[in-house]
Image (cartoon, grey):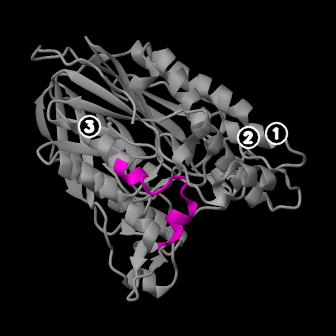
């Protein structure tokens, strides 16, 4: 698709196109007087901008614009924002910058704003602190353009502010779920000897297609908002890495974005897509990386979205109860995860670019932990609906745990919030090995802290 408009062009849409727990008070009113506004903003990086944090080819062209999309919800108790960005990750200071500016534009607190990334790889992965560390070194590679980040975040704030001035009433909310066929598969394929073989997002070898899907969540869930019989917005949630192929330097919203934008065009209803707990989930069983697979995967996700919005169960809207939870995840203790080692690699001009980039990103997290800055999780509660917003790249186990913990509720889960943590593995995975535990910046006890926070957020 030809790039739409200027790099920074913003699309402003009308309503139809262990630390402290913070809780938004629920009202006793049968109807919360809920209103909704929607926004979308082009956040496509310019030519030459690093992609995936600098680890792959930078931008040389544009297949699709990359968008930040979301909804602003407001009732008598406050204002809340759900936003998803067609970027790989926002980490640490970069995440805080985006969330803070959205909050200011919406007239609310950052704790009532959830920003998630869809996690496409031909897209920016941005950690402001990591880039500042690189800026201090001689001949260091570039991780991100902070001038672009600052400008595009301002544009996003404008879009959010406009959404707050174009809000309409919500009388009903709807929920639905349908099975997605032949998209998700576990990245961690257990071998007969108990070892883990990695099934990447695309695999050409026959074994990847022949191996079982493994542990996944096959359901696409949709949260819908209505004014009477008129649909206002569809929010879709599904757990898989969203890559068909990447590394060619061309920006793309990839197969979830194709399905999302096609549905919006077909229905005239604003559509948003959130990636769930996909840290160990890919399309590798069904994707050999050929360009044709992108459209096939988009068709399968799109079919699920259509079936989902055709099977909505509606209920009158009630008051919003927003909860947030701050967690201090423990860092890794091995020597290569220590600041001394990270600084040494970062400052070494003889080290490879990938190694220096990795050291900068890892050191930014190490310094955050040292500064005692926790990670925040949140939950939107709306009647029998629960929407969890989780950080990093969580394993699918956390999504399944949340759904079991609130089995009598509709539970949708969005991962890829603050990406500073990297992978959030299970404790078992560290013993099993495989790719994710070698890359994670968190120590094994993180599983206990994550599950405890999820339980508290879902608790009545």
Q: CA distance from mark 3 to mark 1?
A: 41 Å
Q: Nearer the viewer, residue 303 or 456?
A: 456
The crowd level at tag 3 (other Cα within 10 Å; few <14, some 14-19, many 20+) is some
Q: Which element carries disc 3, helix, strand or loop?
A: helix
Cα distance between the residues tagged 1 and 2: 6 Å
Q: Nearer the viewer, residue 280 or 262?
A: 280
Judge whether residue 434 is colored magenta: yes
| 424 shown above or below 420 | below
> Would you name the residue on which mark 3 appears?
456
Residue 145 position in % (x across, y down): 73, 38
Q: Which residues are magenta?
A: 433-448
Residue wearing tag 2: 131
Determine whether 372 is above or below 346 in the image. above
Helix, strand or loop under label 2: helix
Q: Which mark is residue 135?
A: 1
Q: Compare marks 3 and 1 and give the one earlier in the sequence.
A: 1
Q: Is residue 34 visible?
A: yes
**Could you tell me how many numbered marks the image carries?**
3
Apparent side of residue 155 relative to residue 49 in the rendered image (left or right) = left
- C-beta proximity under 8 Å, tags 1 and 2: yes
Q: Is residue 48 left or right of residue 158?
A: right
Asked if the residue at tag 1 contacts the one at tag 3, i.e. Cβ–Cβ closer than 8 Å, the answer is no
């Amino acid at each position: 698709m030809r790039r739409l408009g200027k790099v920074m062009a913003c699309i402003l849409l009308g309503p139809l196109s262990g630390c402290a727990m913070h809780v938004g008070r629920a009202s006793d009113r049968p109807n919360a007087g809920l209103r909704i506004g929607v926004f979308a903003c082009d956040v496509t990086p310019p030519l030459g901008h690093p992609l995936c944090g600098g680890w792959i080819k930078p931008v040389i062209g544009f297949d699709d614009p990359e968008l930040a999309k979301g909804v602003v919800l407001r009732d008598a108790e406050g204002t809340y924002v759900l936003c998803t960005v067609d970027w790989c990750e926002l980490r640490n200071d970069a995440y805080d910058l985006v969330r803070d500016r959205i909050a200011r534009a919406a007239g609310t607190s950052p704790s009532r704003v959830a920003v998630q990334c869809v996690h496409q790889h031909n897209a920016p992965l941005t950690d402001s602190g990591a880039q500042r560390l690189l800026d201090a070194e001689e001949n260091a590679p570039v991780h991100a353009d902070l001038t672009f980040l600052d400008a595009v975040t301002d544009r996003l704030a404008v879009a959010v502010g406009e959404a707050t001035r174009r809000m309409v009433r919500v009388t009903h909310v709807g929920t639905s779920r349908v099975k997605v066929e032949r998209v998700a598969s576990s990245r961690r394929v257990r071998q007969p000897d108990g070892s883990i073989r990695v099934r990447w997002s695309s695999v050409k070898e026959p074994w990847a297609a022949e191996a079982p899907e493994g542990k996944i969540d096959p359901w696409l869930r949709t949260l819908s908002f209505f004014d009477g019989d008129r649909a206002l917005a569809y929010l879709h949630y599904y757990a898989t890495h969203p890559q068909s192929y990447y590394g060619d330097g061309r920006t793309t919203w990839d197969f979830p974005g194709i399905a999302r934008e096609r549905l919006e065009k077909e229905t005239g209803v604003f559509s948003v897509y959130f990636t769930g707990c996909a840290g160990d989930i890919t399309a590798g069983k069904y994707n050999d990386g050929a360009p044709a697979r992108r459209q096939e995967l988009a068709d399968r996700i799109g079919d699920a979205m259509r079936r989902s919005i055709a099977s909505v169960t509606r209920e009158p809207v009630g008051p919003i109860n927003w909860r947030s939870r701050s967690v201090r995840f423990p860092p890794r203790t091995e020597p290569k995860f220590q600041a001394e080692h990270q600084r040494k690699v970062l400052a070494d001009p003889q080290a490879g670019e990938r190694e220096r980039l990795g050291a900068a990103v890892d050191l930014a997290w190490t310094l955050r932990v040292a500064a005692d800055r926790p990670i925040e999780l949140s939950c939107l509660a709306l009647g029998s609906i629960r929407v969890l917003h989780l950080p990093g790249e969580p394993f699918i186990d956390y999504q399944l745990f949340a759904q079991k913990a609130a089995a009598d509720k509709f539970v949708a889960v969005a991962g890829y919030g603050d990406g500073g943590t990297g992978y959030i593995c299970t404790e078992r995975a560290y013993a099993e090995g495989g790719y994710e535990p070698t890359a994670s910046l968190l120590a094994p006890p993180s599983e206990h802290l994550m599950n405890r926070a999820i339980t508290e957020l879902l608790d009545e």
